[in-house]
Amino acid sequence: MIYREAGDFKTTYAADAQTFPIKLDRWGYFVILAVAVLVVPFFITDYMANAILVPFLIYAIAAIGLNILTGYCGQVSLGTGGFMAVGAYACYKLMTSFPDVSIVIHILLAGLVTAAVGVLFGLPSLRIKGFYLAVATLAAQFFLVWLFNKVPWFYNYSASGQISAPERTVLGVAVTGPSTDAWATYMICLVFTIVLALMARNLTRGSVGRRWMAIRDMDIAAEIIGVNPLKAKLTAFAVSSFYIGVAGALFFSVYLGAVEVGEVFGIQKSFLVLFMIIIGGLGSIFGAFAGAAFLVVLPVVLKVIGSDWLGWPTDLVAHFNLVIVGALIMAFLIFEPHGLAQLWRLLKEKLRLWPFPH
Amino acid sequence: MRRLLTATVVAVMAAAPALAELVIPSLSYRTGPYAANGIPFADGYQDYFKLLNEKDGGIGGEPIRVVECETGYNTEKGVECYESTKGEGALVYAPLSTGITYQIIPKASADGIPVHSMGYGRTSAKNGKVFEWIFNYPANYWDGASIAVKHLLDINGGSLEGKKIALVYHNSAYGKEPIRTLQELSKKHGFEFMEIPVDHPGQEQKSQWLQIRQQRPDYVLMWGWGVMNQVAIQEAANIRFPMENFIGVWWSGSENDVIPVGDGADGYKSLNMHMPGMDFPIYDELKTYLYDKGLAAGAGDQAGTVLYNRGMYNAMIIAEAIRKAQELSGATAITPAQLRDGMEQLVITQDRLTELGIPNFGPAVEASCENHGGQGMAIVQQWDAAAKKWNVLTDYIQSDSEVIDALIAEDSAAYAAEAGITERCN
């Protein structure tokens, strides 16, 4: 009744091809964006920023990155943690070597460095597929973590092997380091997320994205219709790694501030991001956001309900958390393999017909 | 549904702070690969504060509220816990994790909340001139490395010339901390030093112990934590490494680390910054006020273990610092800044320990503006597998301050330059 296409006429090709063809969607998107940009920064607390919103935004970028590779191009990757580490360490080296250059440029450069590393580790994808490729990217994960632990140059020869972000500013406002305001860290992550998500959306529905999807659906057929698998696969690795590198750089510099590679960027991080896109929905930008929100917010919500409201012992809550998240992952795999994004799509289908389903 | 709602509302009302309290967060970990060591510490930490509440109604008449938050030894959850407890008015943080400590050193310094990383965290935080808000007394990792080497010197008649010492360490900031000191000490005493890293969480150490079997070091030191400890001790027993030549730091010397290995662990040594065992009057008080009433934290089965004692010891130091702060400020409901002053002027004598019901439990501690790291003393204890208890082998050994002070000055100066801190106390 409210949510419908009828009466929403498109008179140009541009209007017909826009991201949100339905008026209500479009308005919803603009309202969310306006709230995120114009309202949230004025009410945000340290807790909201550091426990929920900043990690959510950063994980969303990483999930979009992995979704490009796995969801759109069909190349399974277990190297996300390692690639995030590349972004973090590249950002650290750049920040400490060129303190006068803006942090925004460093974060983007860190993304480019990660893209180069990603292409390198993407080369085996030209020969191997599926599980075998997953194992090759797993090797990347372990190699990269080992490298950053082993070679002292990467952590500027500090005694503990930790890297910590010095204070850097954007337009005179501190965004990294200890004395940042919650709204500043939130805003920098938000700006990166919005720009990168827009870029990803447009990439995936343009010719590049179509090539990726052709490779995903059937590589031989794609090759026959003229898609160059070398170019398609390597661009997917490059773009995906760029996103993951930016996420890693933000994760280190803005969110955590001090990082130890084995603990923060270990194999569990790769799995976490993979779970995000599986729960959120493979091959969907919305899915990346939904999955990231789900896995970041759910533990916090369970913790608040369990230990703060109900007063349960913290270990019980932590165990429940594992049980619930595990059960939900299984339930999703069984009942809705296409994830939250598919649920959202179905809901919209239903809404279009509501209240007269026949 | 309505009942659930009512229960929730009641719980929320009950959770809201009604009167002035001393809020002490307990960033604990009762889950994950480090839980075996995290549980006893968290129980001891809470039980001591509970005892003060039950016995004296808190400190200086001010009740203590311990807010527990599960970190799972994970930095991200540590950040979440830090932020959520900060909002409740946390007085001091003791996260029991070197990674989380590194994380919150700059944050807590900016927020003005003291951190007490007792025998862990950043070693150079001992230098109060640079680290205004961070305290790590009574001893730090570099003291530990030096004390272990001193003990080896003692049993070798004062010379380690030509000996080979290996360090098996958790491949993280925690495990890497003692390397610099051991390198210096190897130059000074002429022993050969080899590093053997073990990656988190340390369940797989076959290759490391194969390396030890091949290279035959005379002594093995260990900087391990969690499941890594018991695996290492098991592997050492498997290759028949002489246990009395295997020394763990104070974080690798609890019952949980040796009992699973059984008789094979007999003779394993470790450092300790306080006494093991239950032969202290405080345990009678704990029994009357907590255990008999069923008020003990957690499952209540950890009393008397090394790490339970350490949790109590940590809580005792903080409680003493709170007393000192109350005395200095004249207020009972102190602020984090007042507590920091109290921590800086903390003095714990042996007489005071006796008054508290823990005679000779730890070394005397005296802090100052420059010294946030205490006197750097520890004992060596040895595991008796048949009696299932730790025997105290030595008296308190003083670390080699000649080597350590220079390293601390160097490392803290590097931090000060990086973070743009000017020295205090001048």
Image (spheres, coloured by chain):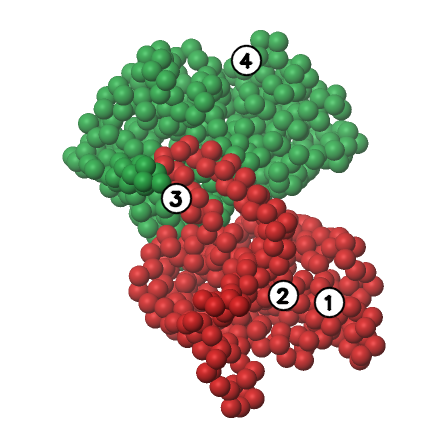
Chain colours: A red, B green
Q: Which mark is residue A304?
A: 3
| Three-letter amino acid code of the residue under disc 3 | Val
The residue drawn where x is 19% and y is 36% is B19
Residue at mark 3: chain: A
Q: Which mark is residue A216?
A: 1
Along the viewing direction, whichever of A235 and B388 lies nearer the viewer: A235
Give the vertical position of B116 relative to A196 (above or below).
above
| Three-letter amino acid code of the residue under disc 4 | Lys
Residue at mark 1: chain: A
Q: Are marks 1 and 2 on the same chain?
A: yes
- Separation of marks 1 and 2 at Cα, in angstroms: 10 Å
| Three-letter amino acid code of the residue under disc 1 | Arg
Q: Which mark is residue B389?
A: 4
Q: Are marks 1 and 4 on the same chain?
A: no
SS at badge 3: helix
Whether the residues at callouts 1 and 2 have beta carbons within 8 Å, the answer is: yes
| Three-letter amino acid code of the residue under disc 2 | Gly
Residue at the front extreme, as displayed: A358
